[in-house]
């Protein structure tokens, strides 16, 4: 019992992905298959972020049936219309909520236009980070943008092939809010295959 309590209180290095899709929207893997794929690659946490307009009505019940020792965040990928559409990932902790401007490289925007969209989004959501990968692939132009938010890597996996291309690592307590706070504060490392 003592060691279990100590493990929960101590900071530890963890590996995670905060942008995944399942059959609860347009992903090709069930939530359990997604968890199994990430768990087999040594992940400590993931976030289900299925698309808002495609969500199955009982998605939370389906997520709740997943069996794993990983930390599973429930989230949603919001479709936001500002001069076209963009996606914002909203990830729930216990008390904390994380908002990420997702896959900024997929909108075919110039760096100046990305910054304009970011300014528009700031009027609508309390943004905490921007995702600088496209389907898990690194983009050095996006990495170099002068953005005041932490820049996060993710694989945005919709299929098994997409799992494990990009992730973050961080030192935090093994609890949801501690992980989200580390991301908000930019206390993580981006990693790529």
Image (cartoon, helix red, strand yellow):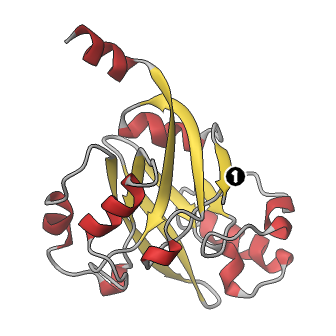
User: Residue at coordinates 47% horizontally, 52% vertically from top-left?
Assistant: 98
Task: Name the spot of residue 160 as percent of width and height, x first.
Answer: 43, 75
Residue 96 visible to the viewer = yes
Vertical placement of residue 41 versus 37, above or below: above
Regarding residue 151, the answer to whether it shows in the image is no
Residue 184, image x, y percentages:
57, 43
- In the rendered view, tell whether residue 153 sits above or below residue 70: below
Structural crowding at the residue carrying mark 1, measured as other residues with C-alpha within 10 Å and reported as few (<14), some (14–19) or many (≥20)? some
Numbered disc 1: secondary structure? loop
Residue 127 at x, y = what percent?
58, 57
Question: How far from the left and from the top, in percent, is residue 126?
Answer: 54, 56
Q: In this picture, is 109 found above or below 185?
A: below
Q: Residue at x 85, y 69 (%)?
A: 141
Residue most extreme to the front? 40
Who is closer to the viewer here, 131 or 95?
131
- Judged left or right of residue 102, residue 150 is right
The residue closer to the viewer here, 52 or 2, is 2
Q: Which residue is mark 1?
A: 149
Closest to the observer: 182 or 189?
Answer: 189
Which of the 4 quarters of the picture holds residue 25? bottom left
Q: Residue furthest bottom?
A: 84
Answer with left or right where residue 192 lies relative to residue 169. right
- Left or right: residue 138 compared with residue 43: right
| Point 66% across, 60% down: residue | 193
Name the quadrant containing residue 56.
Answer: bottom left
148 horizontally vs 73: left or right: right
| Quarter of the rendering occupied by the N terminus | top left
Q: Relative to 93, is 25 above or below? A: below
């Amino acid at each position: 019992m003592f060691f279990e309590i100590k493990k929960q209180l101590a900071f530890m290095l963890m590996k995670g992905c905060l942008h995944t899709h399942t059959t609860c929207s347009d992903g090709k893997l069930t939530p359990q298959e997604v968890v199994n794929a990430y768990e087999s690659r040594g992940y400590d946490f993931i976030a289900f972020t299925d698309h808002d307009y495609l969500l199955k009505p009982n998605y939370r019940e389906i997520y709740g049936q997943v069996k794993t020792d990983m930390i599973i965040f429930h989230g949603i990928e919001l479709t936001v219309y500002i001069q076209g559409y963009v996606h914002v990932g909203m990830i729930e902790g216990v008390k904390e909520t994380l908002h990420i401007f997702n896959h900024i490289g997929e909108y075919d925007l110039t760096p100046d236009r990305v910054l304009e969209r970011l300014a528009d989004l700031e009027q609508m959501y309390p943004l905490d980070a921007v995702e600088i990968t496209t389907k898990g692939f690194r983009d050095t132009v996006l990495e170099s943008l002068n953005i005041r938010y932490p820049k996060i890597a993710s694989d945005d996996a919709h299929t098994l092939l997409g799992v494990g291309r990009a992730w973050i690592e961080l030192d935090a307590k093994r609890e949801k809010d501690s992980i989200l706070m580390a991301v908000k504060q930019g206390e993580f490392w981006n990693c790529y295959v």
